[in-house]
Image (tube, coloured by chain):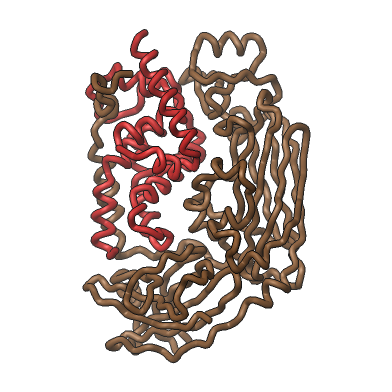
Chain colours: A red, B brown
Amino acid sequence: MDRNEFAARVIGQTDRMYRISWSILRCDEDCRDAMQEAALKAWEKRYTLRNEAYFETWLTRILLNECYAIQRRRKRTWPIEDTAELFVQPKDLTLSLALQSLPEKLRLPLVMHALEGMTYEEIGRALRISKATVTGRIQRAKQQLRKELEV
Amino acid sequence: MDERNIDLRDAVPPTPDLCRNAVLHAVSTYTEEQKMRRPYKLILVVAVITALLCGTVALAASGWNVLRFLQLSDDHMSNELVENVSAQAAVDHCSIQIDSVVTDGKFLAFDWTVQNSDVTKPVYIQVDSFTGNGVPLFTDGNDDFNYQWFPGMFNDGTMQDGNLAMLPDEIIGDKLDVEMVVGVYTPKQPVYQMEVFDADAIRQKQNEGYYVLVAGEGLVFEDPREGLVIGYGPMNNMCADSFDRTEMVARFTVDLTQGRETLKQLLLPEPFDNNGFKMQYTYAAVSSLQVSCTIEMYTDDMSREKADALLSEGYFELTDMDGNMLDAVVLNGFGGIRERDDGSWCVYFDYSFANDAILPDVVSVSFFMDDGGVLFAPIEMR
């Protein structure tokens, strides 16, 4: 994969990168930092991409590391009940708040599956958890989300 | 949840321009970027770890060992180098166990299993120190799996993982004494674990004297500005005093001689001239575990600027002589520019990959140019 193709593939992942980083950080400025750093590191670490077929998962893994690094670096955590710090509000605020109310470990696999179309196997690879665990978390996420929306 | 009626896309905001621009800006710098950020000799190479950790949990019940950690089959030729060490350490209800190690004197890899056998008493565990013969062995900051709440994401309180390190040059002698200090941070008050954030229940439990851990992600504390906040651990200054620290120290000694005996220098071929681009191996060695090589690429009297530009005009891959990329487990891969003895500059690339019988006898660290050209540099591996 040459530089231009690599850049094009990274740019093509922008929306996914935002949604995934939003699922963790829920602050647009932090998302920006994570996405920018992930895009840079992906280029630096491109030699570690063994199979181009896994590009998206590989990039997602780098992005996740950046998100977690930002969480730690800024010693920043987010109040579950508060609205995220966003420049653009979601279309369905009620649904968004319900989604945000889920614990991250449930929210993230759900977003990766329902929004990004990632398979359970791909999610497991990115999050380093088993496929069975992914399945369980997504089921629980759906249950809790439904519960939140019923209230 | 009825997914037919709920569109989660409406729950996440559209990508704001500042994020979109950040990615565009990042990719625009690709041509300028110096790839290597840290001295490679001191880096724990975990290029492969992202892939290695996949399926960790699934493997838990089926015999975790260093070859599985390295994603190598049990009959891989490095199997002869695997040493069983059975290093163990424990404190209270937590333990660490290291069962198998493999080294060829250049790389060191080992498995480890960390367990909290009492899942009702969560602890935060992290690797505080990792040394060989007293010399720090570094982990790549991009892989942050060396700390974790237990049980946290691991419902049974067990995590299986491993480390892969490139040994620094300071490591001399025939024995390597490895020490891994694992801090165990225990909350000072009893912990109540909740799966779902419930503010009323949290406050009630806190009033009863509990720390509340939600979804294994961290403790909940009252932030004066933000209210109840989830995600606290001993690394948060706000609550660092809320933990007692004990430690588990796992030690084992590895004999470097056997692995070193399999480490053989490869015959360095003469420089290849690809239409004025010279490619020259300056180091190449093979062991039962891996193949390492360093290749330089340059033109006559290449300036630093030209080397920098060339670095950005393509990328290296391990290929066969037809230009097909080989599916080798990459242990290390770094590129950069550097000055040669005669004062000219070159692009160089350091490559290590798992030795595998399925690889052809002749491989090439090939440079794929942006214009579609491929510069081959064949080298015999055996």
Residue that protrudes farthest toward the front in the picture: B75
Q: Residue at x 40, y 18 (%)?
A: A143
Q: Residue at x 65, y 38 (%)?
A: B125
Q: Residue at x 74, y 40 (%)?
A: B247
Quarter of the image with the C terminus of chain A is top left
Pick whichever, B46 or B312, lies toward us: B46
In percent of width and height, residue B250 lies at 75, 49
Rendered position, B151 above or below B19: above
Rendered position, B223 above or below A53: above
In percent of width and height, residue B141 lies at 52, 51
Displayed quadrant of residue B107: bottom right
In percent of width and height, residue A43 lies at 36, 58
Judge left or right: residue B106 versus residue B27.
Answer: right
Q: Residue at x 30, y 37 (%)?
A: A116
Q: Report if residue A37 is visible in the image.
A: no
In percent of width and height, residue B287 lies at 60, 74
Pick whichever, B170 or B290, lies toward us: B290
Judge left or right: residue B9 versus residue B107.
Answer: left
